[in-house]
Amino acid sequence: MGIKEFFKPKQDRFVDLLVKQAEITLEGMNALESYMKKRSDKYASAVIQAEKDADETRRILIDDLNRTFVTPIDREDIFSLSRAIDDVMDYAYTTVEEMRILDVEPNDYLRRLVSLLQDAAEEIHLAMLRLDSHPGVAAEHATRAKALENRVERVYREAVADLFSGPEDIHHVMEMLKLRELYRHLSNCADRGDEAANVIHDIVVKMT
């Protein structure tokens, strides 16, 4: 790499990679939603592959970030946004893995949580698509993603409360422990989506 290339901003490159990360994450969440409707290896494999693709995209982004001296978007924001989006996909992956290991069938709460998370992933993806050309629109999508995170937390609390209202036999306790772990994964997933939305807002403020 020549000295001019080292100092040249790579805004399009970074935005493109963030868009790609968000797109892969949306694909992964779509597959997770399908898995919650029909528990099959096909959809589980799609989630697992999306997680691998998302990780590879993040590796490329970080490598580019390390090779670029001047970034039109703060490098801390690029790094934080990429990490938050990656965490969303990671939690989708661990949810599927634990459902397979623990042999848990999807229930209504899991389906509701994942449906909201899929909607939030779509808003983050749309925010990334609009970030460069229409930052104000990107901020609106980020705000919608944050609102969906609040809805996830309400469903999460409802789901956990329901766990403790069942019978007190050992079978129910075992199921309760499994489901609580899965609910927590999805709640954490929503938290990371909320963090991604916060970073998008920060970027928009600095751009305008």
Image (tube, rainbow, N blue to C red):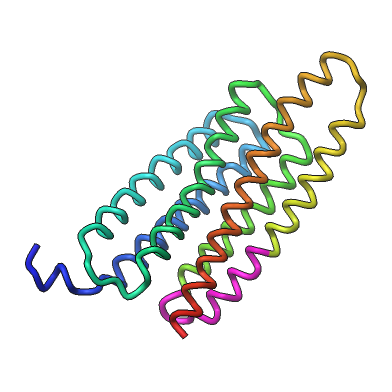
Q: Name the side, left or right, on which 63 lies relative to 184.
A: left
In this view, 65 is above or below 33 = below
Q: Residue at x 33, y 45 (%)?
A: 56
- Quarter of the picture containing the N terminus is bottom left
Q: Name the side, left or right, on which 126 lies relative to 54.
A: right
Q: Residue at x 25, y 58 (%)?
A: 64
From the top left corner, tell me how far across and down residue 89 is, in percent.
51, 46
Residue 40 lies in the magenta stretch: no
The residue most toward the left is: 2
For the stretch drawn in magenta, what is the main secondary structure? helix
From the top left corner, tell me how far across and down residue 2 is, in percent.
7, 67
In this view, 128 is above or below 176 = below
In this view, 188 is above or below 127 = above
Nearer to me, 83 or 121: 83
From the top left corner, tell me how far across and down residue 95 is, in percent.
60, 35
Q: Name the side, left or right, on which 22 lies relative to 35.
A: left
Q: Residue at x 58, y 69 (%)?
A: 142
The residue most toward the top is: 170
Q: For residue 82, what is the image quadrant?
A: bottom left
Residue 144 lies in the magenta stretch: yes
Q: For residue 164, what is the image quadrant?
A: top right
**Region rendered in magenta:** 131-146
Nearer to me, 46 or 86: 86
Q: Name the side, left or right, on which 204 lies relative to 169.
A: left
